[in-house]
Amino acid sequence: MNRLIFRSTQELNEAGAGIIVGLLQTNPKAVLGLATGSTPIGIYEELVKSHRRGLVSFRSATSFNLDEYVGLPPEHSQSYHYYMQQHLFSHIDLPASRANIPDGTAADLAGECERYNKLLDDAKQIDLQVLGLGHNGHIGFNEPDQSLVSGTHVVTLEAATREANARFFDKPEDVPTHALTMGVGTILKAKTILLVVRGADKADIVFRALTGPIKTEIPASLLQTHPNLVVLLDEQAGRLFS
Ligand code: GLP
């Protein structure tokens, strides 16, 4: 595990974007695994700047997003489709046909999970998977449980997750109860994983996930088993690591 602690958010964002830019410069056809949430927004901003400066192109790349809320159409301001358009896709040259996100409005959700798994299988391997971290240790929307699912599946969101994400919705009851998420098996299959964690409120969970026992009740603890894990932390999130 390569763990880096940054004094400023700006430095962290530039480092995160730099890793992605470096990958695309050496492998323009890279398969990127992308995350949502507030954490990666600054990294996406830096990526857009690099693209505008002509330092990186996404023309030959492919992306797979981790998750999407069930029931939110792409034009809903809190859907992860909308988020990706707003923060990244509308500003870069990634072909829409290769920007994959699970469809939370599919009538047949099990069928949609199968379709997404098939696309992931066809892509063989994600080269770089960006991950944020939930306060309960979730990655993507893989919530703490006694067992975890390997492939893309439907999850029931924990009350704590819905509360954490309520800040983005008009009313707490508007937060969807379910989501589609890539499974931990797919996440762990990525060649490199880039875990990004910011803020004092995540210091305890990121420390437990990366140094404590590996258990499905803290899904992110499984990342300890990954041979190529890069962790970017700000000083607040990294304060328990000496
Ligand atoms: C959501 C997403 C996760 C994300 C997490 C943390 O639940 N499904 O992928 O990592 O929130 O979000 P934030 O970065 O806003 O703290």
Image (tube, rainbow, N blue to C red):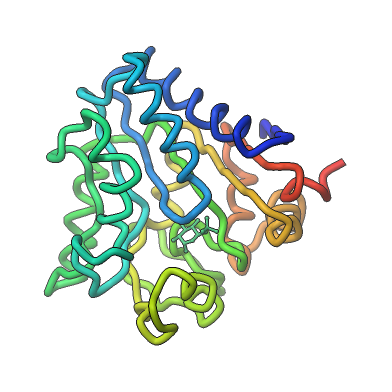
Identify the image quadrant of residue 44. Answer: top left
User: Count the marks: how many?
Assistant: 0
| Residue 46 as seen in the image, left or right of residue 198 | left
Name above or below for residue 45 compared with residue 106. above
Instruction: Give the residue at x 44% y 76%.
Output: 157
- Quadrant for the C terminus, please: top right
Identify the image quadrant of residue 98. Answer: top left
Residue lying furthest bottom: 173
Instruction: Give the residue at x 34% y 17%.
Output: 27
Front-lying residue, 211 or 43: 43
Residue 236 placed where, x, y %? 75, 49
Name above or below for residue 86 compared with residue 161. above
Residue 199 placed where, x, y %? 68, 53
| Residue 242 as seen in the image, left or right of residue 193 | right
| Residue 227 as seen in the image, left or right of residue 108 | right
Identify the image quadrant of residue 144. Answer: bottom right
Instruction: Give the residue at x 17% y 70%.
Output: 105
Residue 112 placed where, x, y %? 18, 63
Residue lying furthest right: 242
- Quadrant for the N terminus, please: top right
Instruction: Give the residue at x 19% y 67%.
Output: 73
Residue 224 placed where, x, y %? 64, 45
